Amino acid sequence: MKLSGVMPALVTPFGANNRVDFKAFEKHMLNLRAAGVTGWVPMGSTGEYFSMSNDERDEVLKFVKAFAKEGEILVAGTNAPATREVIENTQRAKEIGYDTVLLATPFYTRPTQEELLAHYRAVLDATGVNLVLYNYPPKDGIEISFELMDALADDPRVIGIKESSGVLQRAVDIHARYKGRIDLVSGSDDIALDFMFWGADAWICGPANCMAKPCCDLDRAFRSGDLEKAREMMTVLYRAMNILESGKFVQKIKYGCELQGTPVGNCRAPLGELTDQEKDDFRAAMEPILNW
């Protein structure tokens, strides 16, 4: 399986009753498809999986699988704090029809690198899926080390790593060390163009929920070789992307969807609402994107 293009890390729309709003979900995904995304990544952190029951998570995975067309990439988030839960989540995702999963490090426990390697191997051996590692130390509190990646690099089931550390040197190192073995996947949105220069053919992108066409246009401009145009686009996107990275990421993404005319509801607790000032700041940063 080859990861490529812009794949939105999907939000989960919630209705007034705080249940998943599948009608809003369909409208949202139709707009993303029209913008040119290449696939779907449900039940990542942008999808608020941490606030959802297993039944709800399965319902979302089934909905997205049924919505997807042939040729669209599907990657399921199956994360949990314990290895047993991750295996159970992954097995259910595989039964639904997902052959590839995105896995961050188990949250809260902060395992050692040896424990983390055993964790990933246990999931692979129990489920047989393809794995995209997810490195996000600012949120998870632990980094996926190069020693761990060395140990997994020749396993054909480990196909990529979504690098969300925000450290460009990590992207350069991953490209240099693992080209042809583990694909670099952009996960640091405000430096996505830099990741493209360093070999990232795919972008698992939370901001694509509210700025899909600009993200896809940026990706297409780079792939076509129009680097000046790509740089101009990244300059326009940068401010909004940077504000997203400053905190309340999911709340701002959902507010951005509202600004785009496809409201997806509020976040579930403990994620709170944006202040008026936060809305004003993000709306101002989104203005050139809304007029794209």
Image (cartoon, helix red, strand yellow):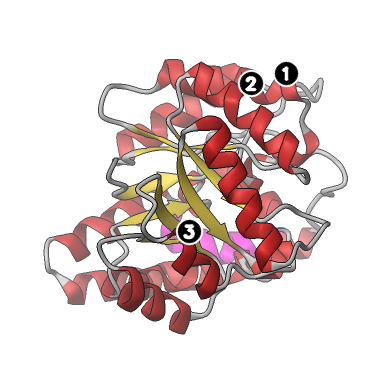
Callout 2 environment at 10 Å: few (<14), some (14 to 19), or many (20+)? some
Q: Which percent across, then down, holds residue 196? A: 30, 68
Q: Nearer the viewer, residue 271 or 236?
A: 271
Closer to us: 269 or 123? 123
Point out the tag, 2 or 3, that comes first from the N-terminus: 2
**Relative image position of residue 238 (x, y in whole percent):** 46, 72
**What is the C-alpha distance between the residues marked 2 and 1?**
5 Å
Q: Which mark is residue 162?
A: 3
Q: Is residue 7 above or below residue 232?
A: above
Which residue is depicted at the point 45% across and 30% down?
29
Q: Let me know if residue 279 appears in the view.
A: yes
Image quarter of the C terminus: bottom left
Instruction: Look at the image and say whether residue 196 sits in the magenta stretch.
Output: no
Counting from the top left corner in percent of width and height, residue 104 is at: 62, 53
Q: Quadrant of residue 93?
A: top right
Callout 1 amino acid: Asp
**Disc number for residue 58:** 2
Q: What residue did someone put label 1 on?
A: 55
Asked if marks 2 and 1 touch (Cβ < 8 Å), the reply is yes
Q: In the image, what residue type sits under mark 3? A: Lys
The part of the chain drawn in magenta is 279-290
Visible residue check, residue 26: no
Residue 159 horizontal side relative to residue 75, left or right: left
| Percent coordinates x, y for residue 137 in the rendering | 66, 69
Asked if the residue under mark 3 is in contact with the one under mark 1, i.e. CB atoms within 8 Å, the reply is: no
- Mark 1 residue crowding within 10 angstroms, few (<14) / some (14–19) / many (20+): few
Residue sitting at the far bottom:
169
Q: Verify whether residue 281 appears in magenta.
A: yes
The answer for how far apart the CA atoms under marks 1 and 3 are is 26 Å
Q: Amino acid at mark 2?
A: Asp
Where is 73 relative to 67, above or below?
A: below
SS state under label 2: helix
